[in-house]
Image (spheres, rainbow, N blue to C red):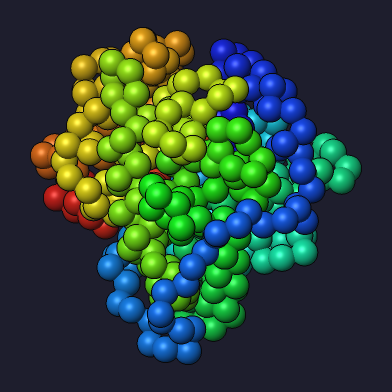
């Protein structure tokens, strides 16, 4: 779902204005009709043997890292709610999914079960198997918008798949399958001319709902998840979803910096979506994380990110206006710099800077999460770049 990633004034104001400009389309109730031509299962059937997953198992890749202990203490409540400290202390399906993934990577089943228990009780409140995207602590009801966020659904299904594999727990496997089959059926458009497309949510982004639709967000292509989801949902062509994401990335090179915008219209030729600032920003910085983590694509697919992040002060990352290639704001928390380190590692084996092996305790949820995810990705895919 479109959402600000920090309290930074420029992106928040611009994104809020874009939301208002979209009008009622994004406020449709969750039981609105599913857009046509969504999922087309492959010839495999649920009862048949699952194809071999091409990804690397996640379990214990982080281990008893002090960064996880700090994360758990700072962002995970006793009840299992993952707190977005820079966004009004809300919780969202994305954060719960990241928390679950980190718990599996740390081999911390007790915390995994706490996070999963809170997620089930508080976000799985729709009439289907998808998750409501946001929970706000000072609102009643805490879930005011029943729309889902497909990236959150993907992350939770992936985490449950990894937990089922790590701990041989059939209940996790069943839950992972139910969520994966549901978002595959309701939010993936397999019949599009661009290849399989991921709608960011059930409501608000389809061609039926927007003049420039369908609308895409490339950071919702969680490439390492799609390498593992065949374990629980083999009837979908996840390899085709990976290919379409890489192909779309190669076409979504906008402006002088050749960077993708947060929101992209796929109505015809790809272009920045109407009503949103044409920024490379909070969501989009995850694109090279997922690409490098999965080890898909070619080095040149990461090159624009390396160019952007390699020629500037590495202690901060820019939010870029793709129209002119200029920074409009800077992300200054240290955890963000793990992303340039991962990209450099993936392209030419550059070792992680020593300081990035530890996680600073004064950061907010999002940069801390990205820092730990980048460390996990490097350990899994490029172990020579990092110390263990």
Residue 69 image offset from top left, x and y in percent? 48, 50
- What residue lies at 24% left-to-right and 52% top-to-bottom? 296
Numbered disc total: 0
Q: Quadrant of residue 284?
A: top left
Please name whichever residue, 360 or 34, is drawn nearer the observer in this view of the structure.
34
In the image, residue 120 sits, relative to residue 102, either above or below, namely below
Say which quarter of the image contains residue 308: top left
Tell which of 93 and 275 is nearer to you.
275
Task: Give the left or right position of residue 373, taking residue 365 as reference.
Answer: left
Left or right position of 282 against 123: left
Q: Residue 42: percent from the left, percent from the top?
A: 42, 74
Question: Residue extending furthest left?
Answer: 348
Nearest to the observer: residue 249 or residue 329: 249
Q: Residue at x 24, y 28 (%)?
A: 304
Tell me which residue sits at (30%, 45%) in the image: 247
- The answer to whether residue 375 shows anywhere in this view is no
225 over 307 or under it: above or below:
below
Instruction: Tell me what residue is drawn at x 28 percent, y 15 percent.
Output: 256
Percent x, y of residue 272: 46, 26
Whether residue 254 is visible to the viewer of this picture, yes or no, is yes
Query: At which x and y percent is residue 339?
Result: 32, 35
State the quadrant of the N terminus.
top right
As displayed, is residue 90 above or below residue 60? above
Q: Nearer the viewer, residue 383 or 340?
A: 340
Q: Residue furthest right?
A: 140
* Above or below: residue 183 compared with residue 246: below
């Amino acid at each position: 779902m479109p959402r600000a990633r920090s309290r930074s004034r420029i992106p928040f104001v611009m994104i809020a204005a874009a939301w208002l400009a979209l009008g009622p389309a994004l406020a449709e109730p969750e039981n609105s009709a599913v857009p046509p031509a969504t999922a087309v299962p492959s010839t495999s059937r649920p009862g048949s043997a699952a194809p071999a997953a091409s990804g690397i198992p996640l379990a214990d890749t982080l281990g008893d890292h002090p960064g996880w202990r700090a994360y758990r203490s700072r962002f995970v409540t006793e009840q299992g709610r993952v707190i977005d400290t820079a966004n009004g202390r809300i919780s969202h399906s994305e954060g719960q999914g990241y928390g679950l993934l980190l718990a599996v990577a740390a081999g911390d089943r007790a915390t995994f079960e706490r996070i999963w228990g809170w997620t089930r009780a508080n976000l799985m409140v729709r009439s289907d198997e998808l998750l409501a995207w946001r929970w706000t602590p000072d609102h009643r009801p805490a879930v005011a918008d029943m729309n889902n966020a497909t990236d959150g659904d993907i992350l939770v299904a992936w985490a449950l798949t990894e937990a089922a594999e790590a701990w041989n727990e059939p209940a996790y496997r069943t839950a992972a399958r139910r969520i994966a089959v549901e978002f595959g059926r309701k939010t993936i458009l397999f019949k599009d001319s661009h290849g399989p497309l991921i709608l960011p949510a059930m409501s608000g982004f389809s061609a039926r709902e927007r003049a420039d639709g369908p609308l895409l967000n490339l950071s919702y292509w969680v490439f390492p998840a799609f390498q593992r989801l065949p374990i629980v949902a083999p009837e979908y062509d996840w390899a085709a979803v990976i290919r379409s994401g890489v192909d779309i990335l190669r076409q979504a090179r906008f402006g002088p910096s050749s960077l993708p915008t947060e929101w992209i219209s796929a109505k015809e030729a790809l272009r920045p979506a109407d009503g949103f600032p044409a920024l490379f920003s909070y969501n989009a910085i995850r694109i090279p994380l997922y690409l490098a983590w999965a080890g898909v694509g070619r080095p040149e697919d990461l090159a624009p990110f390396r160019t952007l992040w390699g020629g500037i002060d590495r202690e901060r990352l820019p939010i870029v206006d793709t129209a002119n290639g200029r920074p409009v704001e800077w992300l200054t928390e240290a955890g963000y710099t793990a992303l340039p380190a991962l990209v450099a590692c993936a392209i030419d084996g550059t070792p992680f800077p020593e300081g990035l092996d530890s996680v600073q305790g004064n950061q907010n949820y999002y940069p801390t999460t990205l820092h730990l995810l980048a460390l996990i990705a490097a350990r899994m895919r490029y172990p020579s770049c990092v110390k263990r």
